[in-house]
Image (spheres, grey):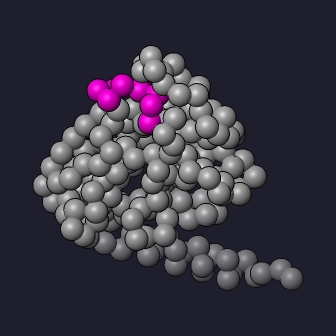
Amino acid sequence: MKRPVAAIAAALALVLGLSGCGAANSTQTQPAAASQTPKKNSRGNIVKHIGDEAGITGEDGNDMADWTVTKIIPDPTCSNPEHQQPEHGHFVEFDINAKTTEKYDPDKYGSLDVGTSYRWQLIQKDGTQWNGMPGSSAAESCMVQTDKLPGSLNQNAKAQGKVIFDVPSLDGTLYYPQMGEGHGWEYPLQ
């Protein structure tokens, strides 16, 4: 079906005419950029990589706690000369910088325990959550105490150190759940 030339000309004139409405030299305010909601994977978790900051934001939109995994080292060299061998197959080292602010409420959120390997979970390459625990006495024995990230941080604290995991495979992701939220952050091991 063909449209009459007159109808097209009228529509074009209307568009051009309306584009001229508005005061000359008027300043238009651009809408503020909406804060970006982190992209979640099919499990509802935020995928992070080496150098990505992760954290907990308060109801007011301000950061309350954050951490950054600065290195992921498969089968690291243990600093404790009396360390045990991995119980599950492989050690994996995460080097982490973590901090909380004065607004972080441990009574509401619990202590920030990214340094506790027992709080993490392994999701295998095929998406199956491993039934074991990535924390073990062998993993705890790998590093001397002064190399380890403290197991938990309370209000207005900061620390850096290593967390050692004991996992059956180097394929998959380690997952840190946000307390009481049913989701968290995943870090691919490869």
Residue range in magenta is 140-147
Work out whether residue 70 can be spotted. no
The one of 100 and 139 positioned closer to us in this rendering: 139
The quarter of the displayed image where residue 171 is located? top right
At 51% from the left and 35% from the top, the residue drawn is 138
Give the percent coordinates (x, y) of residue 75: 59, 25
Can residue 144 be found in the magenta stretch? yes
- Residue for point 58% across, 28% down: 85
Q: Is residue 83 visible?
A: yes
Q: Nearer the viewer, residue 146 or 28?
A: 146
Which image quadrant is residue 110 in? bottom left
Q: Can you give x and y, in whole percent of width and height, for residue 83 in the image?
A: 48, 25
Q: Nearer the viewer, residue 111 or 45?
A: 111
Residue 22 % position (x, y): 31, 72
Q: Position of residue 160 (x, y in %)?
A: 30, 33
Q: Is residue 80 magenta?
A: no
Determine the main secondary structure of the stretch shown in magenta.
helix
Q: Is residue 65 left or right of residue 44?
A: left
